Image: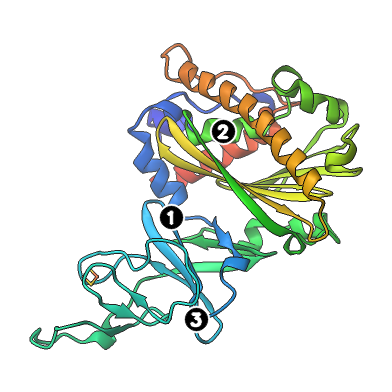
Amino acid sequence: MSDARHDAFARQALQRASALPAALYADPAWVPRERAAVFARDWQLLARADQLRAAGDHVVGELAGVPVLAVRGEDGALRAFHNVCRHRAGPLATCDGRGARALRCRYHGWTYRLDGGLRSAPEMGEAEGFDPASIRLPEVQVEVWQGLVFAALAPRMALAELLAGIDARLGARRLDRFVFAQRISYEIACNWKVYVDNYLEGYHVPHIHPGLNRMLDYRSYRTELGRWHSLQHSPLENAGAVYGEGEALYWYVWPNMMLNVLPQRLQTNRVLPIAPDRCRVEFDYFFPPEGDPELARGDLDFSDAVQQEDIAISEAVQRGLASGSYAAGRLCPTRESGVWHFQELMREALRESRD
Ligand code: FES
Ligand SMILES: [Fe+2]
């Protein structure tokens, strides 16, 4: 095809690559297209397995604007549904909870079993041909990996394919060994992809993060590319008590998740689009069961300081992208292969959604 937009999303070799066009970060017209191509399809982190241990435990969330609900059934199976009642679209659950016996709609009380089938609908006796047994909540794909729950509306790959290679690289470091401690959310005035781009390169570390730069050995900072994820890693230097000796492993997983594994903690990040120029980033912190609360406090404080530095630059970049001054600049092949990899996945998703 020869339309200009097609050319904008053609494959690019790393050595010749330019960044994504500014319009993708700043023009509201792209939001529905991107939502359909990316968020309405592939796997996203939805919950933690520890939130869904027993029958009736449930977690609410959203995939591409569709409210969803994951729930553990009486039979022990984990399922996820559209959190949208089949009567007149009310919500079945409005917050996470434990031990529900059924899913009762908040609006008029239609009640669904934990397997998604309609069990009862009050005062519907006069409705001709109304058959509760034929009514079900639409199901969503859901799977658990290393204590993390992923869900997808119409994924282009199996979850095992999305995460292929991560288990092997983790080796003996089991992520489900860590215990959830707390979530810290940041609302940021930038497009979600600005945040992801920034995460994906260490090129900015000496300039933006002087404190972090003293802990990482910039020269031995490496990026490895997988099909659907990339890994940045570096030996820890002078990390002292907070992070311990060893290796820092920073995975980006398509489309909007990060997995930051240090010897003494796990942190997951979700980058959630809110508006063309706004996103929310959620940091979930996990520590070993035998962890030291002092070290955990030090980690939270240090991570927050680094995050504030990333927020300030990301918001400034968003203003640059929206200014009309910028088109698409060249990437640094040595230091920005992770950015290129993510942007190639974006181009691929947008090409496929057009075809
Ligand atoms: S919308 Fe759910 S019972 Fe009416
Ligand atoms: Fe940064």
| Residue that protrudes farthest toward the top in the picture | 325
Earlier residue among tags 3 and 1: 1
In the image, 210 versus 255, the foreground residue is: 210
Dot 3 crowding, Cα within 10 Å, few <14, some 14–19, many 20+ = many
Residue type, label 1:
Leu
Q: Is residue 268 left or right of residue 108?
A: right
Marks 3/2: CA distance?
36 Å
**Residue for badge 2:** 195
**Gap in angstroms between the C-alphas marked 2 and 1:** 19 Å
Q: Secondary structure at mark 1?
A: strand
- Tell me: residue 294, above or below residue 23: below
Whole-percent x, y for residue 195 in the image = 56, 33
Q: Residue at x 14, y 83 (%)?
A: 124
The reply to whether the residue tagged 2 has its Cβ within 8 angstroms of ligand 2 is no
Left or right: residue 125 compared with residue 186: left
Q: Amino acid at mark 3?
A: Gly
The percent position of residue 214, horizontal first and vertical second, equals 84, 25
Q: Which residue is mark 3?
A: 73
Please tell me which residue is depicted at 29% across the width and 71% down the height of the picture.
105
Q: Which residue occupies the extreme front position in the image?
A: 294
Is residue 13 visible in the rendered image? The answer is no
Query: Residue shown at 41%/14% (left/top)?
Result: 324
Front: mark 3 or 1 = 3
Q: Which of the two discs, 3 and 2, sits closer to the camera?
A: 3
What is the number of the mark on residue 63?
1
**Residue 247 visible (yes or no):** yes
